[in-house]
Amino acid sequence: MDHRRVFGEVFTLETAIASFVFAAVLALMAVAVIRRRAGTGRHPSQRAENNRLESYYLGVLGVVAVFLVVYTALANHREHHTPADRPTTRVEVTGFQWCWEFRYPRAAAQRTVSVQGNCRDKQFPTLVVPTGTTVKIKITSKDVIHSMWIPALRYKMDAFPNHRNTFALTFNQTGRWRGRCAEFCGQRHKSMDFWVKAVPPDEYRKWLSTQAAASATGAAV
Amino acid sequence: MSFTSTDHKRIGLLIVGTSLVLMSLVGVLALLMRSQLALPDETFLDAHVYNQLFTIHGSGMIYMVMTPFALGLGVYLVPLQIGAPGIAMPRTTLMGYWLYVCGAVTMLSGFAANDGAHPDGWFSYPPLADRVNSPSVGSDLWIVGVFLAVTGSILIGWTVLWTVLRKRAPGMTMMRMPVFSWSMVATCLMVVGSFPALLAALVMLAVGRVDPAVFASNVWNIGYQHIFWFYGHPVVYVMFFPYLAAVGEVLAVFSGRRFFAYKGTVLALLTFAALSMSVWGHHMFATGQAANDYYSLTSILLLMPAGIEYFALIGTILGGRLVFRTPMLFALAFIPQFLIGGLTGVMVGTPVIDYHVHDSYFVVAHLHYVLFAGSAFGLFAAVYYWFPKATGALLRENLGKLHFWLLVAGTNLTFLPMFALGYLGMPRRVYTYDAIDGFGWLNLLSSCGAGVLALAMVVFIVNVLESLRSRRPAGDDPWGGQTLEWATSSPPPEMNFPPERPLPPITSYAPLLDLEKQKRTGAGRTPAAGEGSQA
Ligand SMILES: [Cu+2]
């Protein structure tokens, strides 16, 4: 949820600044439209420029720009910083036309657990993750570019073929959220959804071993 | 009417007229899409058709409407504004126009192909756009069509730039050029500097369609994105500057004063154009393969030149004596509406925010506020303002105002809800959504808005046809214009400024305003033609 928190801070600040600027421009326009309309009998100004005001104004713009650049860059780094003392869960995500595969390499007693769906009839695969850990995700694609978007976490990362991106997510509460493919990827792009489910660590371990057992019996048949 | 005339005014009108016809055509595609999205789980269109519609809508509006219209306006106006008898290399301009027409026809003919038109969006990333994933002939036609149209734009851009550099009348120094002509300098610099990158990207795609194995390697996939966006961001300003400057001229004329902060604006346009070449990576924050800090830095710095441009627009009206004719209404609405596009542009230029809203309806809303609520309003301000010059007839004021108010209502009703949709998690380029997603009522509002937009466009078309059918003569200068095009007849004669209509003295970027002032203050003194032009 770190992404969601950082996004919230930055988005709120930028929305506040944007609203202020928008209101100021509207107010100035209102002044012009009401007080300077032809009916009031005022004469148009002869002044072609106001260099002094313009340079002060440019200075203010510069300060705002530098502040925004620095502040948002720091936020970006904070968002991507993973504390070393937290346990790590590793998941390999593969996008394909048109669904997802979630692999947990050697997660349950050296067995790899894999969840894969086909995203047909609104049956979407679920990425199960434990709360309180750093979930390190390696993401790639089998065919075209996809993008793994979890709107509730305010984060997405593209899945490229022949390339692996890595990022980390954290979940400090249990719950289930919808995930989507954000990069247009062809005919069934629309239904390339998935679920993310965060559960307590012990429940996560139990889930892993049932999955591992199920795939073991599946392999034996 | 000749389609082979080398009169820049004829060529300019052909370009502008063609792009307005195409605007209506690809605008209808958007109406079909909004019909499909009005309610959840609709089956009016299937995914295959929907994908073609958004591809051709986006490609059409960007490559074949907003870019050519901006350049066409330059072809028509720049020679007049700088007191030249014609455009430099008119045959090249004409060839550019015909390449553009061939390109548009080629791209649209994809709808007649077996599998339909190209379905991969206006930026068509590989490997999706290779032959394996997009086997339709429509995709080949799209590549060829866009290639031709963009080549045409490059040729036209060169001739306009060359005209400014080589054909200015005596006395027309660079710093006496009207704001619109300056905007065309910045625009054409970006056209010749960045559009070839699109040609390169299209060649890459073409190679990938012959041999899809090329795109098995990530280098070529991510490389395509870098090359494409090297074109893809400057083009946004190509579709912005001329309209911004048209708005500036309209604001000045209907404020009865000269454009405020001219020098700052010229500098801002040039700075903007230069910076535009180094911001492309902000389209790629979510690829995990771009230097996000750097591209965020350059993108956010753009707020400085943009802020100066706004300073000039608002300064102009704050000291004016405002007359609310139709062009003025469109120009005034441009200010806050484009601002919404600009302010949300700072947001999507911020990586932390972009990770969430990238490829969502938030971006769709943002780009339509820039291109439609902003640039298209500038486009209509330009049409209402210069129509009397080009045709000699005035457009109807009452229909113009009806068009304006419908367009304002329709624009905001259509595009404002899209910000919320994107924030709430609706991806772009989906042909439908589920009822449980909760996107229903916002989409319905947006679709209703699209209906209002369609109505507004019908009013506009009726206005143009009616005004041409039963003409109300405009006279040479119906608005009290300040720039040289208003010193000649409407429509201007072949030579622009023949001996019987000599150029007035060129004393500043608003020579007709100077002349007016001189007449008022120095009553009895008649300035000789050409006086003051040798500074
Ligand atoms: Cu996908």
Image (cartoon, coloured by chain):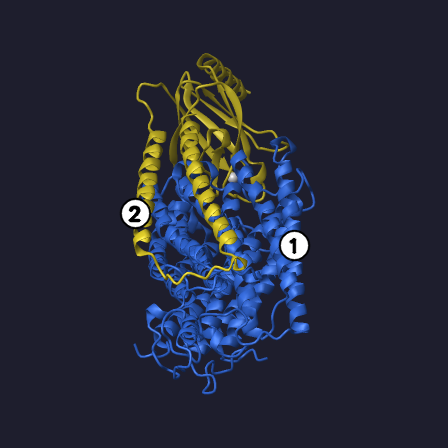
* Alpha carbon separation for disc pair 2 and 1: 43 Å
- Report the front residue among B388 and B443: B388
Q: Amino acid at mark 2?
A: Gly
When the figure is inspected, residue A8 is found, relative to residue B485, above or below; the finding is above
> Residue A5: percent from the left, percent from the top?
42, 27
**A169 left or right, relative to B413:** left
Which residue bears the numbered disc 1?
B454
User: Is disc 2 in contact with disc 1, using a CB cutoff of under 8 Å?
Assistant: no
Which residue bears the numbered disc 2?
A59
The yellow chain is A
| CB at disc 1 and ligand 1 closer than 8 Å | no
Q: Chain of mark 1?
A: B
> Residue B477: percent from the left, percent from the top?
52, 73
Can residue B429 be spotted in the picture? yes
Q: Amino acid at mark 1?
A: Ala
Picture colour for chain B: blue
> Residue B172: percent from the left, percent from the top?
35, 74
